[in-house]
Image (cartoon, grey):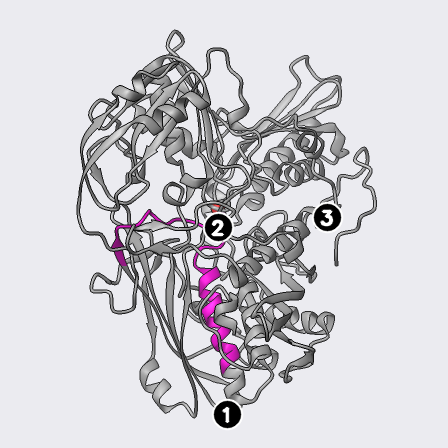
Amino acid sequence: MTATSAPVDTTTATALGAPVPRREGREKVTGTALYAAERHLPRRAYAWPVPATIARGRITAVDTAAALALPGVLGVLTPYDAPRLGPSDDPTLQLLQDPRVPHRGWYVALAVADTLEGARAAADAVRVSYEAEPHDVVLHEEHPGLYTPEEVNGGYPAHREHGDPDTAFAAAPVRVDARYAVPPLHNHAMEPHAATADWDAGRGHLTVYDSCQGTTVVRTVLAGLFQLPEDRITVLAEHVGGGFGSKGTPRPHVVLAVMATRNYGRPVTVALPRQHMAATVGHRAPTLHRVRLGARPDGTLTSLIHEVATHTSRVREFVEQAAVPARVMYAVPDSRTTHRVTALDVPTPSWMRAPGETPGMYALESAMDELADALGMDPVELRVRNDAATEPDSGRPFSSRHLVECLREGASRFGWTGRRPPLREGPLLIAGGVAGATYPVYIAPAGARAHARPDGSYLVEVNATDIGTGARTVLSQIAADALRVPLDAVALSLGNSALPPGPVAGGSTGTASWGWAVHDACTALTDRLARHHGPLPDGGLSASADTTQSAKQKSPYARHAFGAHFAEVQADTVTGEVRVRRLVGVFAVGRVLNPRTARSQFIGGMVMGLGMALTEHGGLDPAFGDFAERDLAAYHVPVNADVPAIEAHWIDEHDKHLNPMGGKGIGEIGTVGAAAAIGNAVSRAVGRRLRELPLTPDRVL
Ligand code: MOS
């Protein structure tokens, strides 16, 4: 199935599964959709943060005289005079509270002025003196600081072992023992992080427009930091220009904006320049992988060992769960999946689209390709041979698992011909590659309200955040479907912490989590309306839902989405340039609720995988302790000319063990495995294994 481009009549189209265009599409393309920095409140001021210029040490003095002498400057906050903050679980938000510098780019002051330019000039004029200490930003396998944490991101145990994988590996007739490296990667959403905060001292109310993935959590965190009751804070995020995880937790910009509005009594906007983002909004931590696979000559895996080393910062422990997908993919009796981490003088890593799965599946699926080579076996058949009937780590049955169907369907659509020597076209070597994909199904509790108005229209309220995914549209479809009314009869309100609490747009949970609450509220309203006789009262009728009970219920099933990627690449033997010619992805994600927005999620994820494979690289400069690539001139995301023909398809998957809509999350799986498929194709084209991303010409030649 693929999206059709046929127009959709939204006066009648209600059914889930219709390719409804984004409801806010016109607002976005006409520039009337307002983002957080575009709230032109009266007397608005601007704040510009000052990043540390050492990688480790402490501030000894801050000279603000030159900054304060500039026209229109309201003040400069420093660790010596900034308001004291209340507690937060996330220490990266304890800003301007003490003179320590845990990494380069850590904020050490905040300049506030009448204009954006004035604030920036004042920030530049702040003179900070430091006592620098030696720093260490380089992760390597033998780093003395590496330790095994208790848990990794997502709450998974860091270490799992079944049977005796070392003995099984040593005894395996066919073995692969390979090391892979994925560099730090940056989220770089189109809209850099921004917030406009307005403290109304008279009312005692704080209003914050924030570019974030969820306003409920931002409100909770701000309440703690600024010691305000939650009902005195409203956080709004009506339109958000992307996040990819970097806006999944509250970020420094919003704390600084609130600090400034509270301190100066004027609305304040903090809009981060893109160059600050690498150091302040999280990144995908680098991962070093050692994967050992043992197999019988027929391809049956007998041992799987996936060991990951990664970094975190000295501020907060975040451990990329890159060995976790190996607990899901293949049936192997003897296995070890384990993580080690070291705290370096680096910015704090965090979520980036499919944390764990993305780098983990690059390594695992590259190793599977190497094993196919060692066996002389078609890599599609190798994966099919090792398909798991139950979840390998837990023994639980899958709610549904159609990896094999994705591989078969992808092979047929792509025209897969097995392991073949590359074709040659002049200086170009051309080959294909394949990789599997998986992403877990998570669900989080949410609330929603639905109102029927006397004029026949409906208002549905849910604190979802549409970060560009189409959430607003698909939630409206879920509502219209449950209410059994045309889509145009339903207005949807979201992105507001005053609505019933909702989880962040993250972990590919949004549609299932918010959608479940919308479904329940609308179903309850439909029941109410059915029992109601005569015209509706002036205030209409309402119903609400809270999925805390249903969403928290532990499923007896292992629930994961699966997929397969096929890539055709060309490698230039003269320049070393790799170009992807074709990408085909096939996914098994339960019911697809809107093929248009779903396709957009899949191909967006695949493009992100293309960038990871070929161009994206965050390099920590050992001397300066800094990310060298901090803007889109240096950090190379794919541009249109890099993106080939991409096809995203999905199979009809009916899974009763998910949620009332029957869909698995789709926001992240598109990126999982895409880089491995491309890497496997490149290795086949050049006839040599490349194990370190990105596959830039210097590595390919
Ligand atoms: Mo996404 S990395 O789960 O926000």
Between tags 1 and 3, which lies in front? 1
Whether 360 is among the magenta residues is yes
Q: Distance between the residues labelled 2 and 1?
A: 46 Å
Q: Earlier in the sequence, mark 2 or mark 3?
A: 3
**Circle 1 residue:** 297
Q: Give the range drawn in magenta.
A: 342-370
- How far apart are the two marked residues, 2 and 3, measured between alpha carbons? 40 Å
Picture coordinates of residue 137, whole percent (x, y)? 28, 55
Element under disc 2: loop
Which x, y percent locates residue 398? 53, 65
Residue at 41% of width from left, 45% of height from top? 278
Q: Which mark is residue 634?
A: 2
Quick one: SS at disc 1?
Answer: loop
Residue labelled 2 has its Cβ within 8 Å of some atom of ligand 1: no
Determine the secondary structure under disc 3. loop
**Is-magenta flag for residue 394?**
no
Indicate left or right for 132 with 166 as reference. Answer: left
Mark 3 residue crowding within 10 angstroms, few (<14) / some (14–19) / many (20+): some
| The quarter of the displayed image where residue 422 is located | bottom right
> In which quadrant is the N terminus drawn?
bottom right
